[in-house]
Image (cartoon, rainbow, N blue to C red):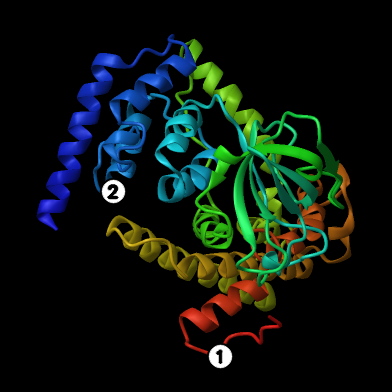
């Protein structure tokens, strides 16, 4: 452990020295991130040949810590970095990595995820979107849903059926499809909490070059499992922190982050706002109510055990192990905590919890919690799917019956 701590300290020192020489808060944002990509300090755990330094995963956290202390801006955040880049690093060809990774780091290319479909539900492998080979291109027909950021994306990671004669898992391929083209229509979806964070995407003769096929034809399911593993482990990705005041570069990065994370501004309500339970109970004079105190204690228990599980998962990643079932545990913990918080808020606020706007508890936040928490059990893989993963991969229970 001493050696590990010494290594982390050495990395932090090297990052700090590099920033002292290169950090300029008034530089151009894209040029600065390009410099990060060239230096390898934006993602030091990535391979050297792909904009990293080939260091252990712990180097990423060490670098971010120093960036935060200095007030320097890091690489771009979001779906592109946390889902697409890891998938490309594992499955992309050298040409694809050369073409896609650097614009992801700099933020020049925005990506979205085109997996779920209206008719497939949680059975992702039952998708019906088709891709048919047409010379050096593929023609895509179908519909996708729950696509965050699709209206602004340059590319989408797309699962499509390329061979309907094979079993459903074997007949799927994985593409990087350009979104800004004829044949791609994006429509926003209005939710019952009045937000419109997601879209539905209609693909009608959309074209994607064969050079944008990730891995081989028919390997899409294997590639998708990599993406999904990173999706579950990145559910709680925090918003980047910036210096309170900075130059042009910092202000541009803040604007970029505000624009990206505005899509997720209702996510604290989706998670149940557990920390509000105690303060709302005290505000209403119920801090000593035995039932309310039991609610508060249960939520505290859930949050602490979830945090310990997350720490264990992070330690596994730092040790070099790939994302595993612990991502499903974290996702389930979030759903359980959201439901417990929902129930607790009902106990505290009673019928008043249905009031929206300024007249409602917490200026209407509690009412928004009630219509947002059901989404927590669906987004990023339903609770049922997570339980199947844990039952089969961790507990060794028999698999779900297959219709293939």
Which residue appears at 60% of the width and 32% of the height? 110
Q: Tell me the element at label 1.
A: loop
How many marks on residues? Answer: 2
In the rendered view, tell whether residue 14 sits above or below residue 375.
above
| In-image side of 88 versus 273 (left or right) | left
Position of residue 266 measured from the top left corner of the image (x, y, whole percent) = 72, 46
299 or 170: nearer the viewer: 170
Are dots 1 and 2 in contact, CB under 8 Å?
no
In the rendered view, tell whether residue 251 sits above or below residue 171.
above
Q: Residue furthest front?
A: 135
Count residues near mark 1 (Cα–Cα under 10 Å), then give few for <14, some for 14-19, many for 20+. few
| In-image side of 401 versus 186 (left or right) | left
Which residue appears at 80% of the width and 48% of the height? 141
Viewport quadrant of the C terminus: bottom right
Which residue appears at 64% of the width and 73% of the height? 385
Position of residue 302 measured from the top left corner of the image (x, y, whole percent) = 54, 70
The image quadrant of residue 295 is: bottom right
The answer to whether residue 333 is seen in the rendering is yes
Viewport quadrant of the N terminus: bottom left
Position of residue 368 measured from the top left corner of the image (x, y, whole percent) = 80, 52
Q: Nearer the viewer, mark 1 or mark 2?
A: 1
Q: CA distance from mark 1 to mark 2?
A: 36 Å
The residue where tag 1 is placed is: 398
In the rendered view, tell whether residue 277 sits above or below residue 153.
below
Question: Which numbered dot is residue 343?
Answer: none
| In-image side of 391 versus 382 (left or right) | left
In the rendered view, tell whether residue 54 sits above or below residue 154.
below
**Mark 1 / mark 2, whichever is N-terminal:** 2
The answer to whether residue 288 is seen in the rendering is no
The residue where tag 2 is placed is: 58
């Amino acid at each position: 452990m001493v050696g590990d701590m010494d290594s982390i300290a050495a990395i932090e020192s090297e990052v700090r020295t590099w920033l002292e020489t290169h950090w300029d808060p008034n530089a151009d944002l894209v040029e600065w991130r390009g410099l990060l990509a060239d230096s390898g300090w934006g993602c030091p755990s990535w391979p050297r040949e792909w904009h990293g330094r080939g260091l252990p995963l712990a180097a990423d956290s060490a670098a971010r810590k120093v960036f935060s202390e200095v007030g320097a801006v890091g690489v771009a955040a979001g779906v592109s970095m946390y889902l697409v880049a890891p998938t490309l690093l594992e499955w992309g060809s050298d040409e694809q990595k050369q073409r896609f990774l650097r614009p992801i780091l700099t933020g020049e290319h925005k990506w979205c995820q085109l997996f779920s479909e209206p008719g497939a539900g949680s059975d992702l492998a039952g998708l019906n979107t088709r891709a048919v080979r047409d010379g050096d291109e593929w023609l895509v027909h179908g519909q996708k849903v729950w696509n965050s950021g699709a209206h602004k994306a340059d590319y989408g990671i797309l699962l499509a059926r390329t061979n309907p004669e094979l079993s459903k898992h074997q007949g799927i391929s994985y593409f990087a499809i350009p979104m800004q083209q004829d044949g791609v229509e994006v429509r926003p979806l209005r939710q019952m909490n009045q937000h419109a964070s997601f879209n539905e995407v209609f693909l009608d003769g959309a074209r994607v070059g064969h050079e944008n096929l990730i891995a081989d034809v028919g390997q899409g399911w294997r590639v998708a499992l990599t993406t999904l593993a990173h999706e579950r482990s990145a559910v709680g990705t925090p918003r980047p922190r910036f210096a309170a005041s900075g130059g042009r570069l910092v202000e541009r990065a803040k604007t970029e982050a505000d624009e990206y994370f505005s899509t997720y501004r209702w996510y604290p309500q989706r998670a149940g706002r557990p920390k509000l339970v105690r303060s709302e109970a005290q505000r209403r004079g119920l801090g000593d109510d035995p039932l309310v105190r039991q609610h508060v204690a249960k939520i505290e228990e859930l949050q602490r055990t979830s945090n310990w599980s997350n720490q264990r998962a992070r330690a596994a990643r730092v040790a070099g192990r790939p994302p595993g079932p612990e991502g499903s545990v974290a996702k389930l913990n979030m759903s359980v905590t959201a439901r417990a918080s929902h129930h607790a808020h009902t106990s505290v606020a009673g019928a008043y919890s249905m009031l929206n706007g300024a007249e409602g508890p917490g200026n209407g936040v509690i009412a928004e919690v009630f219509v947002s928490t059901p989404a927590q059990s669906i987004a990023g893989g339903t609770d049922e799917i997570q339980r199947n993963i844990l039952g089969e991969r961790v507990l060794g229970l028999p698999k779900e019956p297959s219709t293939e």
